Image (spheres, grey):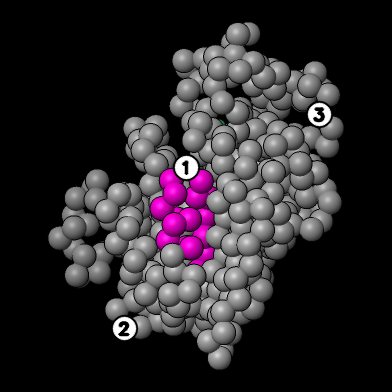
Amino acid sequence: MSAEYRPLIEKAVLDEAAFIRATFTGLVPTAEEPWKKVTLRTVEIRGVPHVQFSYFDERRCIAKNYRGPELYEALMRLLEWPVRNVSLDTTAESIQVTVAVNGKVAIRRQPAKAVEAVRAHDRKKSLLLPDGEPNAYLQAIGFMTKDGQIRADKQRKFKQTNEFLKFLDQTGELEKLDERPIHVVDFGCGNAYLTFAVYHFLNSVKQIPTRVTGIDTREDLLANHRQTAADLGWQDFSFLAQRIEEYVPDSPPTIAIALHACDTATDDALAMAIRHGSKIILSVPCCHHHLQAQLSAAAPPAEMAAAMQHGILLERMGDILTDAFRAQILRMHGYETDVIQFVSAEHTAKNVLIRAVLRSGSPSPRVAEEYAAMKAFWGVTPYLEKLISAAAVV
Ligand SMILES: C[S@@+](CC[C@H](N)C(=O)[O-])C[C@H]1O[C@@H](n2cnc3c(N)ncnc32)[C@H](O)[C@@H]1O
């Protein structure tokens, strides 16, 4: 990277209080560093701020979290690579660096948008709403006491809800959605803490006109949610008592979310989202039984037999494979897909987030080849494939 703008980028990323995010594109892959794109964003790990580097090639995304000297070293390595574009946001400004084919560098600096400054300010506490300030909607859904404290028995859900919204926001895609209103569908919404939160977050915090549909089979729960929504005066907010797989959207879900939808209900949600071309999909799966049954029924690949003789390891392998197949199927349908830790295991053991953003252009044929190879090795057929084949999406 040219010495001309390197100090500017370096200073901005290392300013912990102000740095928000950066994207490096047009990197030239090498044998040691096969990455085409690297994104940086701030994350908190057990309350300590880090910068997360996500390294992308055509097929993979590897995320690493750094702080202190490790952050400095990782940044120095990154700044050594030839790059075509850098886009960086701090609380104070947006920086765009473009390197032309002839090596000519253009640097554009603009004051940060007010919303970014507010977001950065809130980032350290909570993206949704900080604990300790009375809020009508959090009180209405039973999260908060009258004096504005999150109830002790709701702390875990509050944390999960906030994290989910952070991961949604950090796609960087929300501002690019051009339809109005956007349509968010929460598949298997259950007690609907997330459903209410996403409505509030998009409409009130992000100021993106949004209609939200929650789907669940539990009509008893949904009747209460409808009443709460009516009490809050929230419009364009509906709850449908039906099975996910039977849902016929009145407008395609722009964003599909599913938090802990049981077993194959996650696949039903993913299939629905793929079928309707949802732009963003966030799913934290729950239990995984479908593939485990296939793994238990058949002899494992000889190379894995020693591991698979242990029930607990077979079960975990089933979890891993199910989510790996899901992610790969999403990639095969044009989604740039991450599989990342949602919250730390002390909050919930079901803590894998599949996050997918629809991209234009066809996926590399390698993606389907990898999928086929993984299936052949394990001798299984994922439920999501069956759903998609049945709907003739593949
Ligand atoms: C573990 S709860 C999670 C609820 C909520 N998303 C949350 O995280 O608090 C799973 C929910 O999915 C619903 N569910 C499971 N299978 C479903 C299906 N096929 N169609 C609709 N809802 C389903 C259940 O009724 C339940 O409310």
The range drawn in magenta is 8-24
Is 21 colored magenta in this rendering? yes
For label 3, the crowd category at 10 Å Cα-Cα, with few meaning under 14, some 14 to 19 and many 20 or more, is some
- Whether disc 1's CB lies below 8 Å from ligand 1 is answered no
Q: Which residue lies furthest to the left in this view?
A: 306
Q: Which amino acid does label 2 sit on?
A: Ala
Q: Quadrant of residue 192?
A: top right
Q: Do the residues labelled 1 and 3 touch (CB within 8 Å)?
A: no
State the quadrant of the C terminus.
bottom right
Label 2, secondary structure: give it: loop
Residue 54, x across and y down, in percent: 43, 61
Label 1, secondary structure: give it: loop
- Name the residue rendered at 65%, 51% in the picture: 112
C-alpha gap between disc 3 and disc 2: 54 Å
Label 3, secondary structure: give it: loop
Left or right of 250 in this view: 49:
left
In the picture of the structure, the residue carrying the numbered disc 1 is 17
Give 57 or 258, whichever is nearer the viewer: 57
Which disc is residue 200 wearing? none
C-alpha gap between disc 2 and disc 1: 35 Å
Q: What residue type is labelled 3?
A: Trp
In the picture of the structure, the residue carrying the numbered disc 3 is 234
Is 222 colored magenta in this rendering? no
